[in-house]
Image (cartoon, coloured by chain):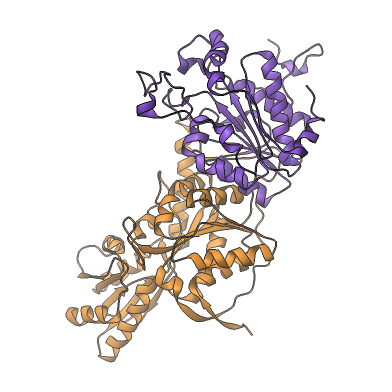
Chain colours: A purple, B orange
Amino acid sequence: MSNRGINDMDNAIFRRPDIMPDRATHFCPGCGHGITQRLIGEVLDDLRLRDKAICVGSIGCTVTSYLYYDVDGTEAPHGRAPAVATAIKRCHPDLHPFAIQGDGDLASIGMAEIVHAAARGENITIIFANNANYGMTGGQLAPTTLVGMYTSSTIAGRKEDRHGFPIRVSEMLATLDGPAYISRVSLHNPANVRKARKAIEIAFRAPLEGLGMGFVEVLSMCPINWKVEPVNAPQWIVDNMIPQYPLGEFKCKPEVEELKKAVRG
Amino acid sequence: MSERTLMGGNIAIAEGAILAGCGAYFGYPITPQNDLLEHMSVRLPAMGRVFLQTESELAAINMVYGAAATGVRCMTSTSSPGFSLQQEGISYMAGAEVPCVVANIMRAGPGLGNIGGAQGDYMQCTRGGGHGDYYLITLAPASVQEMMDLTMLAFELADKYRNPTLVMADGFLGQSVESIVMREPVKSLPPKDWAIDGARGRDRRLINSFEMNPIDHPKRIRLLLEKYERMRLEEVRYEGMLLDDAEIVIVAYGSAARAAMTAMNRARKNNFKVGLLRPITVFPFPSQVLSDLAEKGSKFIVAEMSSGQMLEDVRISVGNQNEIKLVNTYGGVPLTPDMIFEAIDLMS
């Protein structure tokens, strides 16, 4: 067996981003997180952020997101990544903290921190991985769980009268003046993965320019907890999530429109 | 010549922090420490340092975590209910070995209680307070001067041990105004070769407390426990007054120690042989000196503004051969010299 990684091959046509060490992720088969991490890795490479980026892990399946980037990293308590990232940026404006937060982490226990960091216009990047359930703990009801959806704590499905309604985080944050860029994307097919890549790059560029928070909500596959075959999980997003969580930009400051011209894809 | 000035207790903590090189403060309003936050809101930005009023005490402690991880000396201040909220963040910092200073200006609990000064967070401060096996050096000032001096010391000890360090005072002390001697600013801060300040020209660094591996995690905790043991050996601080011939030793800290001093002086005038042992660190607790006094046959009066929380540490240190009497208040009521003198009178 050769020890050569794919990045060492002369004829490779698809490479691991340089910033991502050669290691397997801990994600389940068919999970969307690996794609999101890779897209962020591409952006870290393209924007040459190895010396500036600080990866803030936040509790849930993305807690060890810092393992997959060769940048400084830390680990926030559940829901508090925007607070940790805020302080890093305030104390070291030359650094660029970013976090990948799940929907339980961001939209439930950490709702106060994300709202206030956004309202303050903190110059940080938050990637919000929405898979409509608490993945790491085994698929319980999340604030983003769809009405009627089965979870391990709503075994008869989410009922409006008992469990209330799912929260559209991007739309809600877009009512605030602080954020520079808010967008919802999906990973269900290659065309949308490319759009996600572009949105993530803008969400890094905007705070780097001091324009405010860059925020991308990524609709992400969780076949294990959705109890669907990995191959069918992308279609599950199309059929079930996009009707509740429409894709698109919800906030884009005029200065960010200018920035977009520099983004490829 | 050092300058003397009149200063409030909470302000002395703020000024002590500034002298110690505190580069960032994050806090949330709660009585009786609002003047500390307000003072920082003016002073730090004027010096080009970071001040942020946060959305909650949770956000405050986690911002302290983020700032401290980058190597900046930083702090938050709060009062009892807010301190309860911060336990998770403090536990994370202890686990990740991130230094910071937390000032807890205690008020009466449980629950909402009231805004009167109290010492009811003794257990929470001296036993770690949050989840998991950890301890925090806990400094208990008894004067406005010590509010300043021990805050400066807290920053030193936090960096020395890479551990959160507490300044535990009560609301009465926080609101007291006394004449103090101003201190000199700290000239140079210790280098931090562990801080996450951008991986320029070096390997990346990671600050976390997560360890999935059941072999590695106990190893990591063992290192922490060794650190706490070093604190127990090297950082015990206390003040002993008139202990040599004391037949009765009052044990008291913070505001209660001030009442105890007055009671002791009055008792001495009445020819009672009374001394005072004032813990300055309540963790690590001055157990050995108490144990030595117990050997000599002293009786003890524990004076505190709680149901008798420090009393447990005194009992552990003294054993059950010596008489120990608790004189206490709770619910935001100050302890008076009269109450302590009465106990001395009854015990003599």
Task: Work out whether B163 lies above or below B342.
Answer: above
Which one is nearer the viewer's eye here, A238 or B279? Answer: A238
- Quadrant in which the C terminus of chain B appears: bottom left
What residue is shown at x 76% (from left), y 40% (from top)?
B201
What residue is shown at x 23% (from left), y 73% (from top)?
B297
Task: Work out whether B192 lies above or below B141.
Answer: above
Which one is nearer the viewer's eye here, A41 or A117? Answer: A117
Residue B195 position within the rendered picture, expressed as x and y whole percent measured from the top left:
64, 47
Label count reads 0
Residue A154 position within the rendered picture, expressed as x and y whole percent measured from the top left:
37, 22
Which one is nearer the viewer's eye here, B160 or A209? Answer: A209
Residue A222 can be seen in this image: yes
What residue is shown at x 30% (from left), y 81% (from top)?
B337
Specify the farthest residue to the left: B346
Residue B191 position within the rendered picture, expressed as x and y whole percent measured from the top left:
67, 55
Residue B202 can be seen in this image: no
